[in-house]
Image: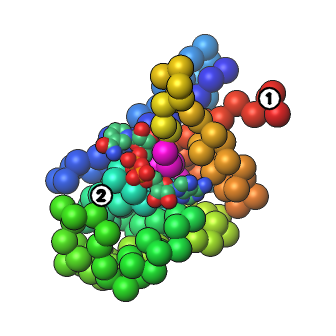
C-alpha cells in the first residue's frame, strides 16, 4: 500500500489536502482524522521547514489563511530577523512579516517544536547535481533531524527512502 499527501494553497482559498491511495482503501487513524479536521477548519498548526524563497512566502500565505504557522530553519540570522519582524526577501515587505506574527507566525531553529504540528511541509534546497539530477541530501538530512520529533498522524509532504543508509 502506498499513501501520499500533498497540499494546495491559495491566497483566498482553503488549504486543500489531496491524498492519493493505491491498491487499498485506508481508514486513517483517529488522530490523523482529527488533524485533517483541523486542516479543514483552519485550526491546524503547520510547520514549514526551510524559510527561503519558497518556505517564507508559503508560511505567510498559510498564516494569512488563518493557520498557526511555525517556520523552522537552521539559519539563525533568518530566525532572528523574522522574530524581530524583519524581512530578508526583497519583494516581501517587513509589514507582511509583522502582520503574520500578529496571527501567531513564529520562527525557530529548535526542531523539538515539530512535535506540536498537525502538518509539516519541507521547503529545503534541492540543487541540481553535475548530472542534472536533484541533490536530495538536504531533504534527507532534514528528515533525519526532524525524525525524533514526528508524531502519529502528522501530515507531511516529504518522503525519503532511507533503506540504503
Ligand atoms: N525559488 C524558487 O523559485 C523555486 C521554485 C520552484 C521550486 N523550488 C523548490 O523549492 C525548494 C526550496 O527552494 P528555495 O528556493 O526556497 O530554497 P532557498 O535556498 O531559498 O531556501 C532554503 C531554506 O532552507 C534552509 N535549510 C537548509 N537546510 C535546512 C535544514 N536541514 N533544516 C532547516 N532548514 C534548512 C536554508 O537555510 C534556507 O533558508 C527546492 O526544492 C526548490 O527546488 C524553488
x and y percentages locating residue 149 in the rendered image: 70, 61
The one nearer the camera, 154 or 94, is 94
Residue 150 in magenta? no
Name the residue at 53% across, 20% down.
Answer: 131
Q: Which residue is mark 1?
A: 163
Q: Considering only vertical position in the picture, is 53 above or below 108?
A: above
On-image quarter of the N terminus: top right
Q: Which element is circle 1 on?
A: loop
Q: Residues within 10 Å of mark 2 (few under 14, many from 20)?
A: some
Q: How is the image coloured?
A: rainbow
User: What residue does disc 2 label?
Assistant: 57
Foreground of the two, 119 or 52 = 52
Q: Nearer the viewer, residue 30 or 71?
A: 71
- Label disc, if present, on residue 18 of the rendered structure: none
Q: For the residue carrying disc 1, how many other residues have a C-alpha within 10 Å: few (<14), some (14-19), or many (20+)?
A: few
| Left or right position of 44 against 1 | left
Q: Residue shown at 44%/71% (left/top)? A: 78
Instruction: Please give the name of the residue rendered at 62% of the width and 18% of the height, measured from the top-left corner.
Output: 24
User: x and y percent of residue 96 in the render?
Assistant: 22, 72
Residue at 52% from the left image edge and 67% from the top image edge: 75
Is ligand 1 less than 8 Å from the beta carbon at label 2? no
Quadrant of the rendered structure where residue 66 is?
A: bottom left
Residue 161: percent from left, percent from top: 70, 30
Q: CA distance from mark 1 to mark 2?
A: 33 Å
Q: Is residue 48 visible?
A: yes
- Residue numbers of the magenta segment: 118-125
Residue lying at the far bottom of the rendered structure: 84
User: Does residue 115 lie above or below 23 as drawn?
Assistant: below
Amino acid at each position: 500500500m502506498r499513501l501520499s499527501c500533498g497540499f494546495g494553497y491559495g491566497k483566498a482559498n482553503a488549504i486543500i489536502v489531496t491524498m492519493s491511495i493505491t491498491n487499498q482503501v485506508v481508514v486513517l487513524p483517529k488522530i490523523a482524522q482529527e488533524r485533517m479536521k483541523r486542516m479543514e477548519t483552519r485550526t491546524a498548526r503547520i510547520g514549514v521547514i526551510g524559510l527561503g524563497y519558497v518556505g517564507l512566502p508559503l508560511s505567510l500565505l498559510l498564516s494569512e489563511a488563518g493557520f498557526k504557522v511555525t517556520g523552522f530553519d537552521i539559519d539563525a540570522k533568518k530566525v532572528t530577523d523574522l522574530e524581530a519582524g524583519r524581512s530578508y526577501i526583497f519583494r516581501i515587505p517587513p509589514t507582511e512579516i509583522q502582520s503574520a506574527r500578529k496571527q501567531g507566525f513564529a520562527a525557530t531553529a529548535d526542531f523539538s517544536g515539530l512535535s506540536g504540528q498537525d502538518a509539516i511541509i519541507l521547503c529545503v534546497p534541492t540543487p541540481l547535481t553535475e548530472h542534472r539530477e536533484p541533490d536530495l541530501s538536504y531533504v534527507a538530512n532534514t528528515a533525519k533531524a526532524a525524525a525524533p520529533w514526528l508524531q502519529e498522524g502528522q501530515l507531511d509532504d516529504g518522503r525519503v527512502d532511507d533503506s540504503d543508509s
